[in-house]
């Protein structure tokens, strides 16, 4: 298998964190997919796509229990000027 982006052949199955955005929140879904080690392109097969879509549907229907592991912070320039 060659990378369709950079044509490199160094593609390895890696655990990556797929991000699903919910308003200001981000849900990390750990998945194992082939990733190009040269340019970072991720390859999703049909099953992985369906798996992620299923999770997205469950999250929006609040059927999933999610654990808070961190916060999303933003540097707000206007409010930090004294
Ligand atoms: Zn590549």
Image (cartoon, rainbow, N blue to C red):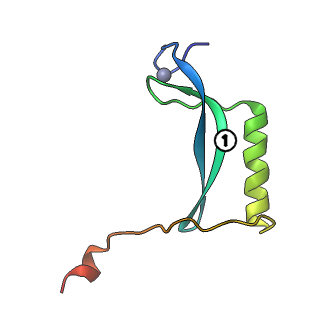
Image coordinates of residue 4 in percent, x first then y, are: 54, 18
Q: 54 and 34: which one is in front?
A: 34
Q: Residue furthest left?
A: 82
Q: Tell me: 55 left or right of 21.
A: right
When the figure is inspected, residue 30 is found, relative to residue 39, above or below; the finding is: below
User: Which residue occupies 41% across, 69% down?
Assistant: 73
Q: 66 and 41: which one is in front?
A: 66
Image coordinates of residue 42 in percent, x first then y, are: 57, 32
When the figure is inspected, residue 51 is found, relative to residue 72, above or below; the finding is: above
Q: Secondary structure at mark 1?
A: strand
When the figure is inspected, residue 72 is found, relative to residue 53, above or below; the finding is: below
Q: 28 and 47: which one is in front?
A: 28
Quadrant where the C terminus sits is: bottom left
Image coordinates of residue 62 in percent, x first then y, are: 77, 69
Say which quarter of the image contains residue 21: bottom right
Label 1 Cα neighbours within 10 Å, binned few <14 / some 14-19 / many ≥20: some
Quadrant where the N terminus sits is: top right
User: Which residue occupies 58% across, 23% down?
Assistant: 12
User: Which residue occupies 61% across, 37% down?
Assistant: 15
Q: Tell me: 60 left or right of 10.
A: right
When the figure is inspected, residue 52 is found, relative to residue 76, above or below; the finding is: above
Image coordinates of residue 67 in percent, x first then y, are: 65, 66
Q: Within 8 Å: ligand 1 and the Cβ of disc 1?
A: no
Q: Tell me: 60 left or right of 3.
A: right
User: Which residue occupies 51% across, 16% down?
Assistant: 10
Q: Residue furthest bottom?
A: 82
- Disc 1 target residue: 31
Q: How many marks?
A: 1
């Amino acid at each position: 298998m060659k990378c369709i982006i950079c044509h490199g052949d160094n593609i390895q199955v890696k655990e990556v964190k797929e991000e699903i955005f919910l308003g200001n929140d981000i849900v990390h879904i750990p998945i194992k997919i082939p990733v190009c080690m040269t340019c970072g392109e991720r390859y999703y097969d049909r099953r992985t796509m369906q798996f992620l879509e299923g999770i997205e549907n469950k999250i929006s229907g609040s059927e999933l229990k999610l654990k808070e592991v961190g916060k999303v912070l933003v540097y707000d320039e206007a409010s930090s000027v004294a």
